[in-house]
Amino acid sequence: MLLMECVLHLYVSTVELSLDSPLNDRKKKDAVKPSLSAPAASVASSSSKAPSKTLEELEEEESEDKFDLNISVTNPEKVGDGMNAYMAYKVSTQTSLTMFRSKTFTVRRRFSDFLGLYEKLSEKHSQNGYIVPPPPEKSILGMTKVKVGKEDPSSAEFVERRRAALERYLQRVVSHPSLLQDPDVREFLEKEELPRAVSTQALSGAGFLKMLNKATDAVSKMTIKMNEQDVWFDEKIQDVENEEQHMRKLHVMVESLVNHRKELSGNTAVFAKSVAMLGSSEDNTALSRALSQLAEVEDRIEQLHQEQASNDFFTFSELLADYIRLLGAVKGCFDQRMKAWQRWQDAENMLQKKREAEAKLLWANKPDKLQQAKDEIAEWEAKVTQYEREFERISATVRKEVIRFDKEKARDFKRQIVKYLESLLNSQQQLIKYWEAFLPEAKAIA
Amino acid sequence: MEVSSAEAALSVSASSIRITDVTQDGDVLTFAIASQKLNSSAGVCVFRIYEDFDWLQQSLFSQENLPGLQGIIFPPLPSKALPSQSNTQTKALKQLGFLALGQDWQSYCKALEFYLQQVAAHPTLCKCKALDSFLINSESPGKQRGRKGIFNRLSQAVEEMRKESHKDVDNFFQNERNKNTNLAALSKVATEKLLDVVMTEQKLALACGHFATSLHLCVNQDDAAAVAFSKVCLKLSDVIEAVNRNFEKVASNDLSTLGLGLDLESRYQEAEKEMLFRRTCKLIELETVKKGTEKAKASKREVIERFHSSRVNVLKNFLIGWCELQLNTAKEFAELYSQHLEACRNMYSE
């Protein structure tokens, strides 16, 4: 299949290919990515209403017509009781890719399964410089509430938040061309029963970040003064650091926005009630009715504010949180490259030592040990070659990954803005309807 | 011979009264009041400070030999504004409620303007010479702190007596008192709750502003992908800026119409309460002198009825104004968001 060939080519070189489809002629200028984000655009998630296809989605679908993989995470269900209870999610896949056994299939997974998937992927691919998407945060408080059976809006919100995060996580994994080929991913999506992932404690959200930070600390403590041949990497890591800082700041602001909206929603509800009471005490019939109508309008506006708060949250707050974690993973790649460089340098040093040792033996004229020395030199020469090649390969991968990541990021954010605007527009149109309905009531007061 | 105040009529048109400007000098606010003369096209403009308004109100209360004065529901005068720097917004809000909000004392001026219009439109009060003098004399009414009107004298005199529980002999008025007490409390609550809503809307606007500005931090022109991302961030910044302006507009609409209206309603309920209180005091006075209940016709039902129809009308106009403003704002921003959406969809992310 054309896609597989593309992926294979990409693995070996950094040449970008464009899919040869007439529909893509207008996109020929853009380097079209086998890195696909179509699943994210056209996935049906349980929380959104059936969206009419936006222009964006149609464009993407046209260009990705050879790749078809939709994933949704739905139906969170509590399994079991008490502290051993857990949430099981339905993971549904729709695809035309031949690497899967069927076109549509569904499995049930729990949170630790997702963490287990991450652990496997990270083990295999991080050291090669791949950006492995990090899993959603683990939350002891959130989960405990759910386990204990607290049926309040905050638990429902927590479950929804997690469901959405798990869905985004899977979408990012499958839109990575190399990760998609990993049999563990296929197994995760297809296999009926997965063995329980046990060692996921260290991989929870906070644990993950801690691990990354430790790794970065360890690397910096090694005082690696990397002789950077390619200044691109130096500049890029700086950009990544800056960007992470900015996103953290933005995240704080969005949280503030969400909270204010929630507050507004609460205040509007209280106001609506006070107007309702005023209306029911009013003698003048028309005024009384107008005030009651007003109370109803305000109630509906309160609902709009709630939805908009949720919109703010899921569109931006979660997006920023995801990217803060992703940028952590990007930094991890750079660290892996550093490690590879260090390994190479250490091998070079070792080779140098062996050569010196050989020279010493030659001078001391000890022919019996000479063969061993020569063997060791050969061994280390091979290692140096191997590590150098690995370093070059990892450098190429990191570079490619970062470029792909940047493109993906721009597309992701753009998509979210469009979604946000659509929701804003919808709210405004609702508001217009409410005001237009109220105006005659106000005019009817006599 | 002096023309009795009962005969003098107002020489300007009530509906033309406007407060056109306000200046602040330290603690003192000076208002420019303009009005149109009735029998010519000439306009008049005078400058007044709050004390002058107070003088006017006191003069209205203390008109002598005016039958039925006690039965009048006096248009309520807003409290004095204290614009000094040490006055925090919380203090100002406590004192003036809605009128403390809004830029450059807009709401406050509107309330004062309304007060003057109501006095000028009142069939009895418009004849008061003090009003005419207030509106057309270039010199301010002077620092005459007039005699305290009947209103103050009476309330002070009977303060010790428990007048609230004193039932009215007339059912109509007793009902009216009950309704008034109820409505006064409810409209006060509604005003406060709307104030909370407006404050939160303003907070939201501010938060949006910060968010929009911070997005500019992400601009980075290093390479093609960074440029694309920067474009996206700047676009988002524009959108959030629009949301900011939206909230500001909505809050301002709330302030200038419904907020003002509810505040006025609240103060009018208080004014009616004062009137009914005066009636009760009169009743008590009469009963102690045993002059019979016929004299208790100090208030007329028509006054009450007229009060209500005028009140309802005022509220109606505010509600219509509010609805229309909010509708226009919603349409304006729907259009703006629609444009942004179009622009976003067409934006290439590379």
Image: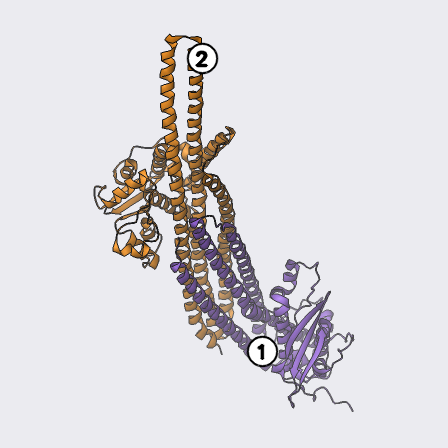
Q: Report whether residue A224 is seen.
A: yes
- Residue A36 placed where, x, y %? 32, 47
| Residue B65 falls in image quadrant | bottom right
**Amino acid type of the residue that numbered disc 2 sits on in the rendered structure:** Lys
- Residue A141 placed where, x, y %? 45, 40
- Residue A193 placed where, x, y %? 26, 36
- A97 vs A427, left or right, is left
The N terminus of chain A appears in which quarter of the rendering? top left
- Residue A348 placed where, x, y %? 43, 24
Callout 2: chain: A
In the rendered view, would you say B268 is above or below A315?
below
A428 or A82, nearer to the observer: A428
Labels 1 and 2 in the same subunit: no
Callout 1: chain: B
Q: How many marks?
A: 2
| Residue B231 falls in image quadrant | bottom left
Q: Which chain is orange?
A: A
- The kind of secondary structure element at disc 2 is helix
Q: Which residue is mark 2?
A: A360
Chain B: colour as depicted: purple
Tag 1 near tag 2, CB within 8 Å: no
For residue B307, the mark is: 1
In the rendered view, would you say A218 is above or below A163?
above
Q: Nearer the viewer, mark 1 or mark 2?
A: 2
For residue A342, the mark is: none
